[in-house]
Image (cartoon, helix red, strand yellow):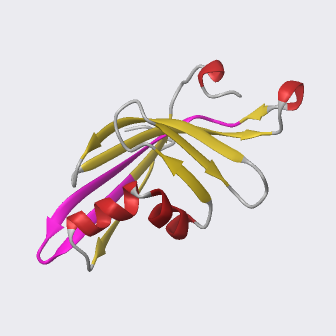
Amino acid sequence: MSETAITKTVVLQATRDDVWRALTSPDELSAWLGHVVELDARPGGAVIIRDATGAIRRGIVEVAERGQTLVVRWRRLDGSGSGLTVGVATRVAFELADEGGSTRLTVREEQVALATSRFAG
């Protein structure tokens, strides 16, 4: 287990299909995060999140197993051109499981090594 990992588990009064839709629909994920989200929720798909400060978080979907697991690698980018500041790359895994008539959602984020050029621009 990585020393930089953060894990949070919650039980949601919703079906796995509803939770999956909230994680993979750009409109629903935008409402949840409070940021503008572009998401192609399939392996290799792009993820772009723009926050209110103008910072962009750019990434790629590693795993998308409908109703079960969504894994994204991303990093924060501030500025542009020679003034571009690149944040630490992290991997975020969303794991869904049945919990009675509800859904258990476990979110784990950990720091990863990632080539800067893939997410720049």
Q: How many marks?
A: 0
Question: In the image, residue 54 lies at what x, y percent?
Answer: 78, 52
Name the outermost residue toward the left.
100
Q: Is residue 39 left or right of residue 67?
A: right
Range shown magenta: 87-107
Most common SS among magenta residues = strand
Q: Residue at x 54, y 36 (%)?
A: 59
Tell me, yes or no, if residue 8 can be seen here. no
Residue drawn at 46 percent across, 47 percent down:
109
Tell whether position 10 is magenta: no
Quadrant in which the N terminus is drawn: top left
Asked whether, in this view, residue 30 is left or right of residue 43, the answer is: right
**Image location of residue 100, percent across then percent down:** 11, 75
Q: Position of residue 28 (x, y in %)?
A: 45, 66
Quarter of the image containing the C terminus?
A: top right
Considering only vertical position in the picture, is 33 above or below 57? Answer: below
In the rendered structure, does residue 92 fall within the stretch colored magenta? Answer: yes
Q: Choose between 105 and 21: the one closer to the eye.
A: 21
The residue at 30%/42% (across/down) is 64
| Residue name at image x 24 percent, y 58 percent | 96
**Left or right placement of residue 72 versus residue 75 in this view:** left
From where the camera sits, is residue 76 visible?
yes
Q: Position of residue 51 (x, y in %)?
A: 69, 57
* Relative height, residue 40 to residue 83 (above, below): below
**The quarter of the displayed image where residue 21 is located:** bottom left
Q: Nearer the viewer, residue 1 or 101?
A: 101
Q: Quadrant location of residue 25?
A: bottom left
